[in-house]
Amino acid sequence: MPNATTGGGSRPTVQVPPQPQWPILSADEKRATKERIAKLLKAQDAVLVAHYYTDGDLQELAEETGGRVADSLEMARFGTQTESSTLVVCGVRFMGETAKILNPEKRVLMPDLSATCSLDEGCPPADFAAFCAAHPDHIVVVYANTSAEVKAHADWMVTSSIALPVVRHLAERGEKILWAPDRHLGHYVQRMTGAEMLMWDGACVVHEEFKSYALERVRALHPDAAVLVHPESPDAVVEQADVVGSTTQLIRAVTELPNPEFIVATDTGIFWKMRQLAPHKTLIPAPTAGEGATCESCAHCPWMAMNALQNLERVLREGDQEIQVEDAIRERAVRPIQRMLDFSAQR
């Protein structure tokens, strides 16, 4: 099996913001806020799509108002399927950009445009363009967690739920792959497919903090628990998993596996949907560096946490957090995204 090689120079420094502290709303305040947002959505012909990692109140509101709670792949599909003229994306910026790339005629709003992603910020477009230019004999496959400018340099875009079949397809054709930006996901994909892959040196601040030695201790305390791991996690954590998969695949595991307990190594925002679908199961967060130390995320993305009922209502009133993608970039970036969607539809 070919070895994966990490390239792309030294990893850019990413400034991780503190976790936002939102005012706690009473039950009556929360209900009234949701009612106002629902009216604003209807008045503006808008639909809400929320990622599984956002606050549970946003996920609940999306479902209550005819929107969608989804992973990155389904978020990309949903924007093209709805007839609403405005998409309100609760997630991080690359998700809003992807919605705009696929739906240039629609208005795409986000509660906070500064909600980015450590993988996105750790892959600057100019540096990535130089990396691609240095390896012209490679097929460029980028993870969804990248900017529109980075996607514009790619041949394929993938999400974690479709990365394995896409790369396996390319490997069977004998292609050499330049992969960006998450090296942990890249290593997992390379091990599972045997593809020849050159990696960008990026990582997610949430998933990189899960610790294998601490996970071993938690497993010993809960011997009947199944371990669910997102493949953005380090190899030593992935190796302990009963199920490795995307957010949707991990949610499905909670509903389908017979285990009474689950140790979950991904963003704790996913627990809302898991508890909704499997309220009788016990969910245990996998340990991070927060155990007896400090951590940058403590298993919850600080950029995802920038989405809240308060700024969702504000952006619907003011409309100032609108995603824009230059036409020249959009025309190039849409190709790898559409290629993934077509591949998924054929499967």
Image (tube, rainbow, N blue to C red):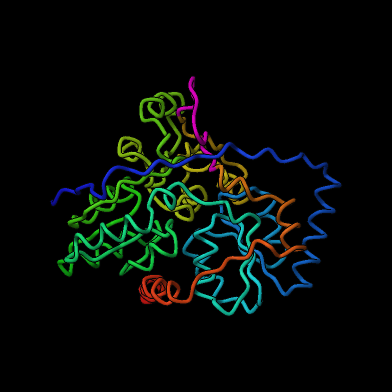
Question: Is 232 rendered above or below residue 330?
Answer: above
Q: Is residue 347 visible?
A: no
Q: Residue at x 23, y 47 (%)?
A: 6
Q: Residue at x 24, y 59 (%)?
A: 178
x, y (%) of residue 74? 50, 65
Q: Residue at x 57, y 45 (%)?
A: 269
Question: Is 286 rendered above or below residue 258?
Answer: above
Q: Is residue 214 visible?
A: yes
Question: Is 33 rendered above or below residue 10?
Answer: below
Front residue of 325 and 231 = 325
x, y (%) of residue 158? 37, 62
Q: Quadrant of residue 20?
A: top right
x, y (%) of residue 279? 62, 44
x, y (%) of residue 241? 36, 40
Front residue of 69 and 304 = 304
Front residue of 163 and 146 = 146
- Chief secondary structure of the magenta portion: loop
Say left or right for 8 vs 328.
left
First to last magenta residue range: 289-301
Quarter of the figure with the C terminus: bottom left
Taking the magenta stretch, the answer to whether it contains residue 252 is no
How many numbered marks does the figure carry? 0
Question: Is 122 rendered above or below residue 80?
Answer: above
